[in-house]
Image: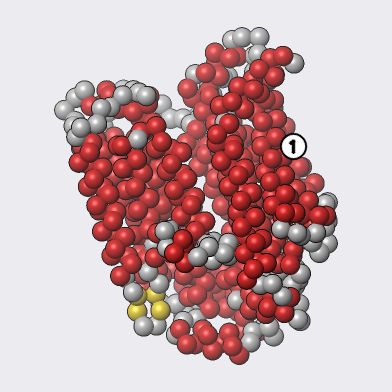
């Protein structure tokens, strides 16, 4: 017991600032969202009008959640829960991999297993650490809703549903760490499952059955294969059902049981999917820093490209399904038709434009990881080995920036290709091929910002590269994609690059904001490269 407590306290101390940041961020988002809803949609009639528009515009359901009535608590749950659950899932997967596969990769797990702690107490400490973290998230969300005057029972269910998603993905993260030989690969796979759960939930909500009054949606089957969809089935504030939370606990328990079985049969540092043995001699092409950066990042880039392809395929498939459901749904009003016709776009095009913001975020993450990998190389000391040869610091940084830019383009390209293939396969002609590729191109400037800005942080404040890089991206997503829902003023939302993403309409694409962002990204990259000339490279 004493060994377990020591290991648990070590994890708590190591994650103290990250855990505080995650819990406060999720709790404050819940608080801001509730306050914004109460201020903007104070009466039930206005909320009912918005919900009828949402059920007639499945794009909104994909990005928001499941409609279960116009009561203030249910309306707030519809708007914010899916995003809170997404954050809880990402927090849990990162935590699980950080204290398992990353420890084995660094060699620290082998040192601990050589002590009386052996192998099982570290796993137990990590599991308990994750459970406590998600309990804190659940408490923060519940308190945020309670502080806004919402129903106590519904607030507790909403908080528990958020924490339960985190618990489910804690198990997924632990299991991914058993299969992959690197922490980057495990993080990539586990995060992909979180994003997939979000998209499946959106697909199920958008293609669900709408009630005659347009105020209730019964989710389709894809929501039932998503832990985030399970959380929505609690019907917080309207049904307050606790039994769907058992699905989360079952998934977590099954994943943990699988982890125990696998750990009992493998060596420390090994994995179910063994990494490939390296070559004795390097390939002829591996002669420069760009080739080395590509070799180091190829697994992560491939993972994000697959995620982009899946997003595109799902976007095109959902677009066709939505177009069909909208044309037959009695909830589609003349006002909605007039709005779409005024913009000169179809429902499918509107959906693609909305969902490609997710592809833009995936591309931004892929670009950010190029800079984060650069920092990891520096801390591990391998960067110093590279610089001891004929490679200069500016060329070293420039190689990773170039690779990051290429990876951003690849992720967006795969997303556009997936959407084009799925639309062509379904026979949907409402969106031209050029529009799909143009929509993907529109996401490029914002994604490049999150490549260049972390590069400046890496040069000027190396230790803050990882925490500040993820924080800036998280704030950009919260302000740019969810800022309106959270009630932020336009001046605050304009701080996010995603707010200025070009939008394609019947009149064309206004790229003024895009050109400004490309210029800013170029200036930031040039600043990083110039400052790199005078920066010392070390392991701190």
Apparent side of residue 269 relative to residue 457 in the rendered image (left or right): right
**Location of residue 492 in the rendering, given as x and y in whole percent from the top left corner:** 46, 61
- For the N terminus, the image quarter is top right
Vertical comparison of 145 with 354: above or below: above
Instruction: Please name the residue shown 64% across and 84% down the image.
Output: 332
Whole-percent x, y for residue 540 in the image: 37, 24
State whether residue 262 appears in this view.
Answer: no
Q: Which quadrant of the figure has residue 267?
A: top right
Q: Is residue 373 above or below residue 514?
A: above
Residue under numbered circle 1: 253
Can residue 250 be seen in this snapshot? yes
Can you give x and y, in whole percent of width and height, for residue 260 in the image?
Answer: 69, 27
144 up-or-down from 373: above or below = below
Q: Tell me which residue sits at (70%, 30%) in the image.
A: 128
- Which colour assignment does the render follow? secondary structure
| Residue 443 location, quadrant | bottom left
């Amino acid at each position: 017991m004493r060994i377990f407590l020591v290991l648990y306290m070590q994890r708590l101390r190591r994650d103290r600032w990250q855990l505080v940041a995650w819990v406060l961020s999720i709790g404050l988002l819940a608080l801001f969202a509730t306050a914004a809803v109460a201020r903007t949609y104070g009466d039930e009639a206005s909320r009912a009008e918005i919900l009828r528009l949402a059920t007639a515009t499945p794009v909104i359901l994909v990005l928001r959640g499941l409609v279960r009535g116009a009561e203030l608590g249910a309306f707030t749950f519809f708007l914010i829960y899916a995003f809170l659950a997404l954050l809880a899932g990402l927090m849990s997967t990162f935590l699980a991999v950080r204290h398992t596969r990353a420890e084995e990769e660094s060699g620290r797990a082998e040192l601990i297993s050589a002590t009386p702690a052996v192998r099982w107490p570290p796993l137990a400490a990590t599991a308990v650490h994750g459970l406590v973290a998600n309990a804190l998230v659940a408490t923060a969300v519940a308190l945020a809703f309670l502080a806004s005057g919402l129903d106590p029972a519904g607030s507790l269910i909403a908080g528990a549903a958020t924490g339960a998603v985190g618990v489910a993905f804690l198990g997924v993260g632990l299991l991914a760490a058993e299969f992959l030989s690197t922490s980057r690969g495990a993080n990539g796979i586990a995060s992909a499952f979180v994003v997939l759960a979000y998209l499946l939930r959106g697909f199920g909500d958008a293609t669900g059955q709408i009630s005659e009054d347009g105020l209730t949606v019964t989710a389709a089957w894809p929501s039932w294969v998503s832990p985030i969809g399970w959380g929505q089935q609690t019907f917080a504030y309207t049904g307050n059902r606790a039994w769907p939370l058992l699905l989360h606990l079952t998934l977590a328990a099954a994943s943990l049981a699988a982890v125990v079985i696998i750990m009992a049969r493998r060596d420390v540092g090994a994995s179910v999917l063994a990494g490939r043995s390296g070559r004795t001699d390097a390939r002829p092409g591996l002669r420069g820093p760009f080739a080395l950066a590509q070799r180091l990042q190829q697994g992560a880039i491939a993972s994000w490209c697959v995620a982009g392809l899946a997003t595109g395929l799902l976007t095109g498939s959902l677009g066709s399904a939505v177009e069909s459901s909208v044309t037959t749904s009695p909830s589609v009003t003349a006002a909605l038709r007039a709005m779409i016709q005024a913009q000169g776009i179809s429902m499918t095009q509107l959906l693609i434009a909305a969902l490609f913001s997710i592809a833009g975020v995936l591309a931004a993450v892929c670009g950010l990881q190029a800079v984060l990998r650069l920092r990891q190389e520096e801390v591990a000391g391998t960067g110093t080995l590279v610089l001891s040869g004929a490679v200069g610091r500016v060329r070293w940084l420039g190689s990773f920036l170039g690779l990051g830019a290429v990876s951003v383009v690849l992720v967006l390209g795969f997303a556009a290709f997936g959407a084009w293939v799925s639309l062509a396969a379904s026979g949907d002609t409402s969106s031209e091929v050029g529009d799909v590729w143009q929509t993907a191109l529109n996401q490029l400037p914002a994604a490049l910002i999150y490549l260049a800005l972390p590069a400046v942080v890496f040069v000027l404040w190396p230790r803050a590269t990882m925490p500040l890089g993820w924080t800036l991206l998280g704030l950009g997503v919260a302000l740019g994609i969810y800022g309106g829902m959270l009630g932020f003023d336009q001046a605050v939302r304009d701080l996010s690059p995603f707010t200025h993403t070009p939008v394609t309409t019947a009149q064309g694409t206004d790229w003024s904001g895009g050109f400004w962002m490309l210029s800013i990204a170029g200036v930031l990259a040039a600043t990083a490269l110039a400052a790199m000339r005078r920066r010392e490279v070390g392991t701190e």
